[in-house]
Image (cartoon, helix red, strand yellow):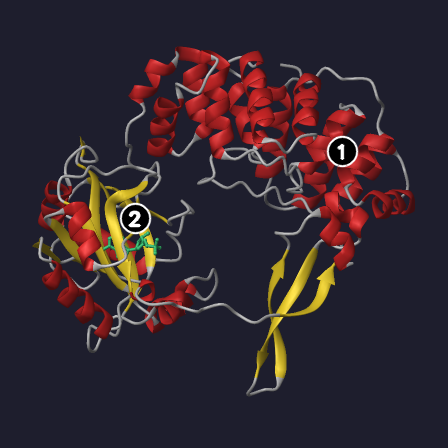
Amino acid sequence: MRFAKFVDYLARLEATTKRLEMTAIVAELFKDANEDDIAPIVYITQERLGPAYEPIDFGIGEALAAEALMKATGKGKDEIKKLYKLRGDYGDVAKELLPAEAKKLTVAQVFERLMQIATTSGEGTVATKTDLLADLLKKLSGAEARYVLRIPLGRLRLGIGDPTVMEGLSWSKAGDKSLRPQIERAYNVCSDLGQVARIFKAEGVDALAKIQVKVGNPVRMALAERAKSSEDIVTRLGKCAIEHKFDGFRCQIHKQGDTVRIFSRNLEETTTMFTDIVEGIRKQIQAKTAILEGEALSYDPETGEFHPFQVTMQRKRKYDLENMTVKFPLRLVAFDLLYVDGKDFTGEGYSKRHDKLASIIAPGERVQISQHLVTQDAKEIEKFFMEAITGGLEGIMAKRLDSKYQAGARNFNWIKLKRSYQGHLSDTIDGVVVGFLRGRGQRAKFGIGALLVAVYDQKQDKFGTIAKIGTGFSDEEWVQMR
Ligand code: AMP
């Protein structure tokens, strides 16, 4: 597909916020695409160059974009800056400055060049990236460049979420949403919509069944519904397993021999942050290959007690990692098993997965199995819950004994009962608007894009800023706010 044609679709998508219309346009686009284009198309519409779990950092900021535009158009810095001030978006500036007639590059070619720009590293990176981007812009029309520039700047903002892509794929072939379940299953297992789209386009919906749990490829995680009380749990599950609910970091761990990778609940890779867990997995997990899940918590090595989340949270940083491992060591409480030594366990019941998981964890400091109580007695559950709360935990998790591991699903196979649900929790925060951020992109015309909010620190008699708030307002309200 010519990139120019793709851009026509993007323009149509940009012009609507109606979900049904978006789905229809996306479906038409997917129908139009061939099997080589479809993965790049899926990634680009979602402002990416690959699946979300493999983030690619373009390393292109506004300064670099402006520089590339200067090179591509021969215009001076002042002119570009002036136009940017007016439009608030380098994509729009590019559209104004570059020729109008459509060019010949295909989606695959543009994608490849963007990839090349993104993966350039080492000495002289900035200059090389600028040159590559300028070179690409020269080969594009204004309308094409408008979108190409927005991608690395993270300003495409089409609002095409995973559900719209999945629904669009189904409509593109079936003319309705009937194929969505197979598409969604495949996506939940491999977390890569580009790959799903390619197989779906090239080989048809039945071929999606061959997408299976694979070590190294994060699986979208199962989530829990909530219950109001212990009785509620028993009514829904009958006899079930009750575990503690630990408040730390959800970890999905992929072990392939000595290679260990860890993914967060959002499927971000956290391996380098949690080196102590990696070490523990190598030492204690008695399997060559495995995918398991658990909660990583900071603990006191003297007493073995777990710390509250505020302490564990200190580990979530990207610098001074070594020191953090010593100061706040982590332990993994393992609670699920998805795969071990060539066998997919996601189709097995909870009890079988839990037993197998327990059997492959050797004793040691870093990894322990999540203990559970099997019961159908609400009083017993209540006691377990109270003990958990008294021990400083967040609550309990109830699990249906025969439930499969349902990737990406939130349902009553897992039920959480948290302290905060009992009675009314008021944890709202009183914030003070102390400033605003000048709007860019769509909001340039409002002269405001987000509010800067602070809370009062009584001890220091100061307002400390805590958040930028950019959602929840209508266009009229933004104007009013300004
Ligand atoms: P919530 O974040 O409140 O929706 O609760 C779900 C989260 O609880 C999961 O994503 C896990 O990170 C965490 N969790 C803590 N203990 C357990 C457990 N025993 N079983 C499953 N999830 C747990």
Task: Give the residue type at disc 2.
Answer: Ala
- Neighbour tally class for label 1: few under 14, some 14-19, many 20 plus, Cα within 10 Å: many
Ligand 1 has an atom within 8 Å of the beta carbon of the residue at disc 2: yes
Q: Is residue 152 left or right of residue 420?
A: right
Counting from the top left corner in percent of width and height, residue 95 is at: 81, 31
Quarter location, residue 458? bottom right
Task: Give the residue type at disc 1.
Answer: Ala
Counting from the top left corner in percent of width and height, residue 142 is at: 80, 27
Q: Quadrant of the N terminus?
A: top right
Q: Residue at x 54, y 19 (%)?
A: 27
Q: Quadrant of the C terminus?
A: bottom right
Give the number of the disc on residue 409: none
Counting from the top left corner in percent of width and height, residue 121 is at: 59, 43
Q: Secondary structure at mark 2?
A: strand
Q: Secondary structure at mark 1?
A: helix
Give the number of the disc on residue 224: 2
What's the distance in space between the residues labelled 1 and 2, CA to CA? Answer: 48 Å
Give the image quadrant in which the ligand numbered 1 is located. Answer: bottom left
Count of numbered circles in the view: 2
Q: Is residue 135 visible?
A: no
Q: In front here: 73 or 195?
A: 195
Q: Is residue 260 left or right of residue 39?
A: left
Q: Which residue is mark 1?
A: 134
Quarter location, residue 191? top left
Q: Residue at x 25, y 44 (%)?
A: 412
Q: In front here: 421 or 370?
A: 421
Q: Is residue 139 left or right of residue 247?
A: right
